[in-house]
Image (cartoon, rainbow, N blue to C red):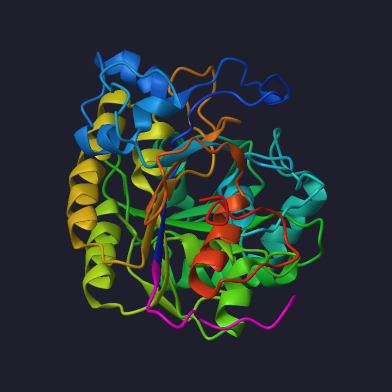
Amino acid sequence: MGPELAPRDMQRRAFVVVIDACGVGELPDAARYGDAGANTLLHVAQAVGGLELPTFGRLGLGNILDLPGVAPSRAPVLHGRLAPLGPGKDSSTGHWELMGVVVEEPPPTYPDGLPAPLRDHVETTIGSPVICNRPQNGIAAIEEYGEEHLAGGWPILYTSQDSVIQLAAHTSVISAERLYAMCAALRASLQAPGAVRRVIARPFDGAPGGFTRTTGRRDYTLPPPSPSQLELLAAAGVPVHGVGKAPELFAGIGFSSVHPGATNGEAIASMEHLIGELDTGLVFANLIETDQVYGHRKDSAGFHRALQVIDAALARWLSATREGDLLLLTADHGCDPASAHTDHTREYAPLLAWFAGHGGRRRDGPLADVGASVLDWLTGGRAALAGRSFIADA
């Protein structure tokens, strides 16, 4: 896995916060994914008449790209745009690449629903027929098929442009625990390198016309195909704390502890607890609602409100930082509300990194620079993984 590493002598901490789907412009190959012209933050800003994000603005969000409402900072932190080295535009791809795992071949997707042999395998494995089997927004799927599900008891299966199989079930028909068992069994049965990347459990409740997904979502992800920076940190004795869905995207590998984050409120509370309590280690957090609640629903106003809540939390986090801290904000992909579809968009991710000696520089590069920089910050080491530390450039 690389050279032997150990924590630095001085107490250092790193906080990596992924603001899900917060893309900042189309990648050069975006048209191949149907995403020509995508720019999530710009189009959200245009839709709401300008963003009101004073803390992000002070750090340099407006130095990364021209954004209505966000002027360039005169004293930015290290800032720039990050790009994936491999194909894809899903959460697992983005998070894996942030920690140095690059997959050369795209995972399977099901733009026409699952083919018959795979659907048969799903039904045999979970012990039930399924309904829907279409690429669909999750809210639309339960609205359209929820009553049929209540009548027949069969789970709703839907897909997207991502490499996912999602199973939704009303908690009064299939308990959340039973749904989790179904998804875990399906994940265990689909383990080949070319298997679907994620199986996602989506419990919901409520009555027809008012179905609501619960906060009980669980992602069952293929393990990364190669070691990540997280495993190198763990091997070096550095505690690695996961918040929200980040640990699930790595199948838990490399994490020493997991903290609540099913909603942004939970994730922010976990972040604030960890900032106040930890003496050393990495916190790797995902803030999900810009993607799950607002991006896929093309709700620009809600997306902006979610960013404003994060902006206020960010101000508190900065006030609680210590000497020896690295606080880094980024994303995993886009989810442009102006796109013709409701799926993720192939975009650059923003980079804002506060640490001693950042110098206010612009630093564009691959997503993998994040993990390389965290490893450098916490251990002073390098690894033979993708990415180059921007700490070393300071």
Q: In the rendered structure, does residue 3 fall within the stretch colored magenta? A: yes
Main secondary structure of the magenta stretch: loop
Is 324 on the left or on the right of 322, as rendered? right
Question: In this image, 157 relative to 301: left or right?
Answer: right
What are the residue bounds of the magenta stretch?
1-13
Query: Which residue is nearer to you in this view: 257 or 386?
Result: 386
Compare residues 112 and 256 and report the one nearer the observer: 256
Q: Is residue 332 above or below residue 43?
A: below
Placement of 5 over or under 112, stated as above or below: below
Please say whether residue 369 is visible from this viewpoint.
yes
Q: Position of residue 232 (x, y in %)?
A: 63, 75
Does the stretch in magenta take in 56? no
The image quadrant where one finds the N terminus is: bottom right
Q: Position of residue 253 (x, y in %)?
A: 59, 75
**Does 152 appear above or below 138?**
below
Q: Position of residue 209 (x, y in %)?
A: 28, 36
Q: Which residue sits at x=45%, y=80%?
A: 239
Look at the picture and state if 196 lies above or below 338: below
Picture quarter containing residue 6?
bottom right
At 20% across and 62% down in the image, what residue appears? 320
Q: Position of residue 58 (x, y in %)?
A: 26, 35
Q: Residue at x 70, y 68 (%)?
A: 383
Q: From where the camera sits, is residue 175 visible?
A: no
Task: Answer left or right for 186 relative to 243.
Answer: right
Report the number of numbered marks.
0
